[in-house]
Amino acid sequence: MVRVLAVACTLLAFLFLVNANSEGALNAKAQMVKGTIKEVQVDKNVLIVNQKVKNETVVRELSIEPTTEFVVTKAGKKEEGTGANGLRLLEGLKNANVQVKCDKDVKVLKVTVSVK
């Protein structure tokens, strides 16, 4: 009887630890990609960004989801959109500064662009 109780407590503790670790993975810190816009492909829902990493420039091709938020600031005016409609706001803004917030799976959550 004592052994059954000990095994049950051990299993319960193990499940608790596994659950706590998986919650930590879900709450992982978002990644930020900072750089300039290289290309906007509205037909493919793709944003291509030049990102400076140390002494070289890396090209990041980011797929845009329907839930991706966009905030574009031009001359002090703020425009917002989501998904493909938000991506259209970036047309013609080549070389503009961009910040892209991604989750741990590099799914694009939010795109912020500032045009000088």
Image: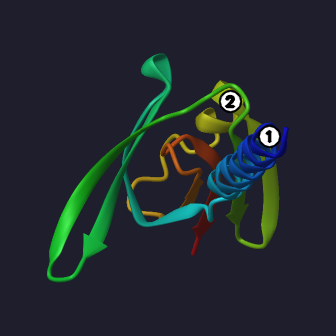
- Label 2 secondary element: helix
Is 74 rendered above or below residue 106?
A: below
- Residue at image coords 52%, 40%: 91
Task: Pick the quarter of the image with the C terminus.
Answer: bottom right
- Residue at image coords 64%, 26%: 84
In this picture, residue 23 sits left or right of residue 93: right
Could you tell me how far apart the alpha carbons at marks 1 and 2 are, in whole angstroms?
48 Å
Q: Which amino acid does label 2 sit on?
A: Gly
Between residue 88 and residue 98, name the one nearer to us: 98
- Residue at image coords 40%, 63%: 36
The first of marks 1 and 2 along the sequence is 1
Between residue 70 and residue 5, name the one nearer to us: 5
Query: Label 1: which residue?
Result: 8
Is 83 rendered above or below residue 7?
A: above
Query: Label 2: which residue?
Result: 83
Q: Position of residue 3 (x, y in %)?
A: 75, 43
Disc assigned to residue 79: none
Q: Position of residue 16 (x, y in %)?
A: 77, 50
- Label 1 secondary element: helix
Q: Where is residue 26 in the image (x, y as percent from the top left)?
A: 68, 49
In this picture, residue 36 sits left or right of residue 22: left
